[in-house]
Image (cartoon, rainbow, N blue to C red):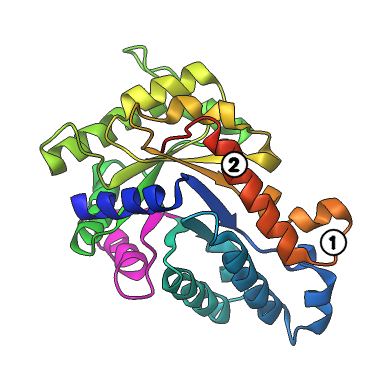
Amino acid sequence: MIAYTERLTQTIQRTQTFGVVNIDPVFDRLPSTLQNSAANPLDAIDRFCRAVVDAAQPHVGIVKFNIAYFEVFGADGVALYQKLIRYARDRSLFVIGDIKRGDVGHTAAQYAQAHLAGDDAADAITINGYFGWDGVEPFAEVANAHQRGVFVLVRTSNPSAAQLQDLHLSDGRKVHEALAAEITNWNRAALGNDNYLGAIGAVVATRDRQDAARLRAALPQSWLLIPGYGAQGGTAEDFQPYLRPDGLGALVAAGRSVIYAYQKENEAADWQAAIEHAASEFVADLRRISPNV
């Protein structure tokens, strides 16, 4: 799985940013010019997502598509999701598929094949890790075979997450900290070397700097995918503790603050230029906390 890490590292070094642009399109929030001129909502979403990719590509090396915003349109939406993955990869972007699938055995294996194998697959996907290794292993095996990666949900940002993920175990750890320790064990077993970043990453979302530092320490060999920048209130400084000393290991994601940037100016005449400007500002802000990435 070192090849996966090398590819992700090269993407970050080439673009000099660890920023990720989330592309979660909602038809009612698209520019009115697209809504009014498209043959149907899916056509408008297709045109919008391609424009976002084109606007983001000069500034970031990673985009993330959330499949839910496409699945709502049925089979045609899923086909568009796959087409957009190809579109982004053709533009040298690293693509994360936000699918949050989870199960065990043959069912997990089928999910893994569907989302990690083949030319239409993303470079990495998000999965639910609370099935334990039985649920993660099928995804890890397919990811390994195709030099791709997974991000396991560890600590999510929704308000009620703490009711379960922050429960204390008998040894004093929180539930999510126990899962983080398991992920570290899985990466070490796969790599046999504590210096490498592995293909089993984690989705973590806390803006408490002490919690962030603890999660970074608990996941020394994991890429961390961290939502929350911009519209969710996160600033660059909130994410600094997630970085390793070498400036790698953290992927900070911004969504609405970038892709709907044109709404700040009462739908700017050039909405794509507004998106590109927001992507540029996002990247510049992240470079303040790690200028030598």
Identify the residue at the far left of this view: 192
**Image quadrant in which you'd find residue 187:** top left
Q: Amino acid at mark 1?
A: Ala
Which residue does the image show at 47% across and 20% down from the upper left?
211
Residues marked 2 and 1 touching at CB (< 8 Å): no
Residue 112 in the image: state x and y as whole percent. Answer: 31, 62
The residue tagged with tag 2: helix, strand or loop? Answer: helix
Q: How many C-alpha atoms fall within 10 Å of the one at disc 2: few (<14), some, or many (≥20)?
A: some
Label tally = 2
- Tell which circle, 2 or 1, labels the residue nearer the N-terminal end: 1
The residue tagged with tag 1: helix, strand or loop? Answer: loop
Q: Is residue 264 above or below residue 178?
A: below
Q: In this picture, which residue range is highlighted in magenta?
A: 100-125
Depth order, front residue of 182/216: 216
Q: Is residue 157 above or below residue 9?
A: above
Depth order, front residue of 67/244: 244
Look at the image and tell me whether residue 1 can be seen: no
Which residue does the image show at 83% across and 75% down from the upper left?
33
Which residue does the image show at 47% across and 45% down from the upper left?
17
Residue at which label 1 appears: 268
Residue 21 in the image: state x and y as whole percent. Answer: 56, 53
Residue at which label 2 appears: 284
Q: Per the image, is 168 magenta?
A: no
Depth order, front residue of 161/170: 161
Q: How many C-alpha atoms fall within 10 Å of the one at disc 1: few (<14), some, or many (≥20)?
A: some
Identify the residue at the far bottom of this view: 39
Residue 161 in the image: state x and y as whole percent. Answer: 55, 32
Q: CA distance from mark 2 to mark 1?
A: 22 Å
**Image quadrant in which you'd find residue 235:** top right
